[in-house]
Image (cartoon, rainbow, N blue to C red):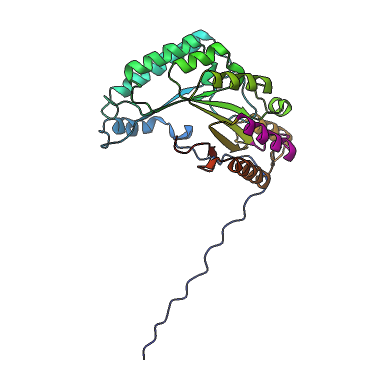
Amino acid sequence: MSTTTLPVLPPAPTAPPLQKETTAGNYFVANYPPFAYWKQERVGELQAALEQSPAPGEDLGLYTHIPFCRKRCHFCYFKVYTDKDSSQIRSYLDALLKDLAAYAAKPLIKGRQPRFIYFGGGTPSYLSPDQLKFLTDGMKRLLPWDAAEEVTFEAEPGTLTDHKLKAIRDLGVTRLSLGIEHFDDHILEINGRAHRSKEVARAYAYAREIGFPQINIDLIAGMVEETEDKWKEAVAKAIELQPDSLTIYQMEVPYNTGIYQQMKAQGKLVAPVADWEAKRRWVNYAYSEFEKIGYTVTSTTTVVKDPAR
């Protein structure tokens, strides 16, 4: 009778403990290369990719960045500008269309039509209706939107007059994403947001009135001076709005933010925001409340009313 001797395996490595305190750093994973990747020596890689033919059946998406804001939030780490006049904005739009024309002529892009289009920022709604029309007319000439199933447009509620909302809808935007972040005016102010709760209510009501097919709202869990009760109030107000989707981010303090600069000046390592345990608990609470009324969690950051749409 033979026996088999199994090898003795080393114990499985234990996972490091979850970090509790919020310290300076950036943990959110994005699907575009960080600024540090965009270096002169990598231009060849981009050019080589653009010379390839697309794979059969491969969808094309188009992201357009608008780097202008009324003010810079204390937690913002994006490349944004708050001091540009209309002529400087026009120069940027001209350059953007020139850039798009160069892409549209390359084998990877030429002759294709985008299936989805996304305007992000910064604050796309910072642009005037005339500036937006100039930009989108130019984009449509280069890459027609006829095949687009969704056109998403990020907006800051305080920039949305009725006239501008109507203009955005007329451009062909099908999904309006409102950067609400919170409904409490004190929290909005102390975190550097430009809008207030009354502007949220007015913009949301008119956006519904003129028939945007989809409206998304953003919240941030754990901003400066957030509390359990204030967060629950924010979730309740979000539920009252019945958005088509809700996106929740957990507060981070990247190195190039105003909050980090304040921490650095004061010699502090821990950020003055909620710890990770609280933020995870608050996000779970929000998702649970939305699930109770029929929403579906579709990712780590999103719940939607109707997944089929």
Q: Say if the magenta span includes residue 166.
A: no
Task: Give whichever of 299, 241 is nearer the camera.
Answer: 241
**Which region shows up in magenta?**
221-241
Task: Give whichever of 88, 203 is nearer the camera.
Answer: 203
Which residue is depicted at the point 47% across and 9% down? 130
Q: In the shown orientation, is residue 268 left or right of residue 18?
A: right
Q: With respect to residue 109, does 252 lie above or below?
A: below
Which residue is depicted at the point 67% across and 25% down? 192
Q: Position of residue 36 (x, y in %)?
A: 47, 34
Q: Position of residue 18 (x, y in %)?
A: 62, 52
Question: Which of the 4 image quadrants contains residue 93?
Answer: top left
Q: Position of residue 114 (x, y in %)?
A: 35, 27
Residue 194 visible to the viewer: no
Q: How many marks?
A: 0
Q: In the shown orientation, is residue 210 left or right of residue 253?
A: left
Task: Give whichever of 145, 136 is nearer the camera.
Answer: 145
Residue 306 visible to the viewer: yes
Q: With respect to residue 113, does 163 lie above or below?
A: above
Q: With respect to residue 104, does 131 lie above or below?
A: above
The quadrant of the image that shows the C terminus is top left
